[in-house]
Amino acid sequence: MNRRQLMAAATAAALPIPALAAGRTRWKVRASEGFDALCFLGPLSGKPLYTRYYEAELAAFRPAFPSSAQAALDRLQAAADAKGSLLAPGLCTLLSGASDATLDDVSLAVREAEARVRPAYAASPYWDQESWEGFLASRADLLAVLAGLKTAGFPAFRQTFLRAKLEPRVAALSARLAALDVIAEQERLIGRALEPEIEVILLWFSKPHGTRIQGQRFLSHVDYPDDLTIRIAAHEILHPPFAMEGPTAKAAIAALEADPLMVRILKEHDPAFGYNSMEGILNEDTVQALDQIVSDRLGVARPPAERWAKADEGMHVLAAGLYGLLKADGYDRTGGRIETWMAGAVKAGRLAPASLHPAAAGVLGVPADQLWPRPKT
C-alpha cells in the first residue's frame, strides 16, 4: 500500500463498520396509482426508451386517450427534451411531496401546487427555481394530460396488470428486505448519517427506471427481481454522494472537464439516458461506484465489467474508474467519508487520464484506448 492509500485508509478507519444486518434500516413497501400515472407519460410520449417495454399496453390504451391530451403531452415532452431532462421522473420527483395515492390526488396537487407541492419541494435538495417556473408555465398541459388519463380509464386499466400480483409481491419483498441493512452500509461509505427509513414504491409503468424521489423513497417495478430492487435501493439513497455545489464537486468537475475522454462521453452519449452535464455524470457515477460496493457486500451485485459494459451503452466509464480506485485503496473494507476521499483523489491527480483510464480499463477488462465507445461484441 502506498503512502496515499495508507493515509486514505487511516482516515476511513475512524468510522466503525456496522454488521450487515444490524437492523438500522426500516423498510416500507407499497404501490401508488398516482406515480404510475405520471410514469405512464413516458410510454405515451412515444420515446423508444419506454415504448419497447409497453407495446401491448400502448396498443390497448391509445384508442381511448384523447387527441387533445396527446397534443398536450407532446408539448410537455418537447419542453423536457429542450432542457435535456426526463419528463416523467422529473415530474415524479417534483410532485412527490404531495399525496400520490390516486390519479385524482395528483391532479389536485397540480391544480393547487402552490399550497400542496411547493412547500415540500422548496425544502428538498431537489429545489430548482427554473424547474418550478417551468412546471407552473406548463401546468395547463399537465392537467389536460391527467384529465385525459382519467377519461381513458387509467385507474381500472392499471389494475388489470397489478390486481393479481401486487399484494403477494409486497409481502414477499418486505420479507426479503427485512434482513438487509442497506442504510448501515451506505453510511459506512459516505461518512454521514442517513434516516433509517427506506420506502419502495412498486409500479407497473416505471421501466426502465428506478427513480429517487423526495425523502428516502424510490420508484421500482413490481416485476423487478428482489436483487434488482435491492440494488436500486443501494443506489438511489446515495444521491447526491456529496454537495454538488461544494468545492470538492467543483474541483472534480474541473478535472473531468480537462479529460478529453470524459468530454467525448458527455457529448456523444444518448441524451435520453440523462446525465447531460459533467455534474450529472459525477453525481451518478460516484453513486454507481459506491452502490457496487454495497451490492458486493450484500451479495446481490452484478459483475462490474458486465454491469458497466451494458448500462446506458457503456457510458459510465467514470463509475468503473472510481470503483477501481476505491478498491485499490481498500475503501470497500474500511469505509470513510466519500467527499474527503474524492477531494484527496482530485488533489493527487487520480481523476486525470493517466490514473482514471487504467483503473477503468482494469475493471472493464478492455484496453484503456477502447473505453469509449465500447467495442462491439
Image (spheres, helix red, strand yellow):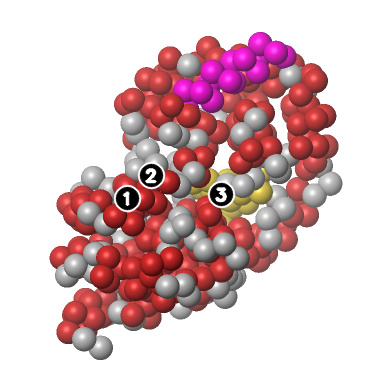
Question: How many residues crowd around disc 3 within 10 Å: few (fewer than 14), some, or many (20 or more)?
Answer: many
Q: Which residues are magenta?
A: 66-80
Say which residue appears at 56% left-offset and 49% top-offset: 210
Q: Given contact means CB atoms under 8 Å apart, are the residues at marks 1 and 3 in contact? A: no
Task: Report if the CB atoms under discs 2 and 1 are less than 8 Å apart.
Answer: yes
Q: Nearer the viewer, residue 193 or 264?
A: 264
Helix, strand or loop at mark 1: helix
Q: Residue tagged by mark 3?
A: 210
Q: For the residues carrying marks 1 and 3, which lies nearer the camera in this image?
A: 1
Choose the circle earlier in sequence order: 3 or 2: 3
Instruction: Identify residue type, mark 3.
Output: Gly
Quickly name the residue at label 1. Answer: 263
Q: Position of residue 177 (x, y in %)?
A: 61, 64
Cα separation between marks 2 and 1: 6 Å
Foreground residue among 52 and 369: 369
Residue 58: image location, x then y, percent: 76, 31
